[in-house]
Amino acid sequence: MRIGELAEAAGTTARALRHYEQAGLISSERAANGYRVYEERTVVRVRNIRYLLAAGLTLDDVRVFLPCLDGDVAAAPPSAKGLRVARERLAVLDARIAAQTEARDRLEVALRERTGDRIRPVA
């Protein structure tokens, strides 16, 4: 299948597919006309990549899951390495959230000192 067909079947964009290919997560052959051609089973792999990215992992993190990207990643029992990567990513996200919360609180205090108003976060 060509890149546009794969993008549609996997619910993503051709640009994302080229990015995944550059990252070494998927591969293609080249047709005589130079177009990328993917195997049908690549749809499952791309859906799994998207699932892991949506869960908060990075493309580098997803590389750990290469051996199981062609199966049902969501239903498979987690590996020790996969759990380690997920826990590390969670710690990074928690640290970022804490840093952003501190910055928000400092800004709120500064605004309150200047205006006397309590700033309410937009929901």
Image (tube, rainbow, N blue to C red):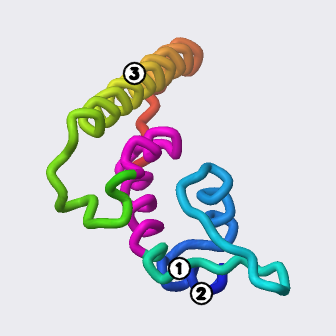
Q: Which residue is mark 1?
A: 39
Q: Residues within 10 Å of mark 3 (few under 14, many from 20)?
A: few
Q: Which residues are magenta?
A: 44-66
The correct choice, above or below, for 96 with respect to 75 in the image is above
Question: Which element type, helix, strand or loop, lies under badge 1?
Answer: loop
Question: Which element type, helix, strand or loop, lies under badge 3?
Answer: helix
Of marks 2 and 1, which one's residue comes earlier in the chain?
Answer: 2
Residue 116 at least partly seen: no
Q: Residues within 10 Å of mark 2 (few under 14, many from 20)?
A: some
The correct choice, above or below, for 89 with respect to 115 in the image is below
Q: CA distance from mark 3 to mark 2?
A: 42 Å
| Residue shown at the point (52%, 12%) measured from the top left | 113
Kind of residue sitting beneath label 2: Met
| Residue shown at the point (28%, 30%) measured from the top left | 84
Q: Position of residue 85 (x, y in %)?
A: 34, 33
Q: Position of residue 75 (x, y in %)?
A: 17, 61
Q: Quadrant of residue 2?
A: bottom right
Callout 2–callout 1 Cβ contact below 8 Å: yes
Q: Position of residue 4 (x, y in %)?
A: 65, 83
Of marks 1 and 3, which one's residue comes earlier in the chain?
Answer: 1
Q: Is residue 29 magenta?
A: no
Q: Which residue is mark 2?
A: 1
- Which quadrant of the figure contains the N terminus? bottom right
Q: Residues within 10 Å of mark 1 (few under 14, many from 20)?
A: few
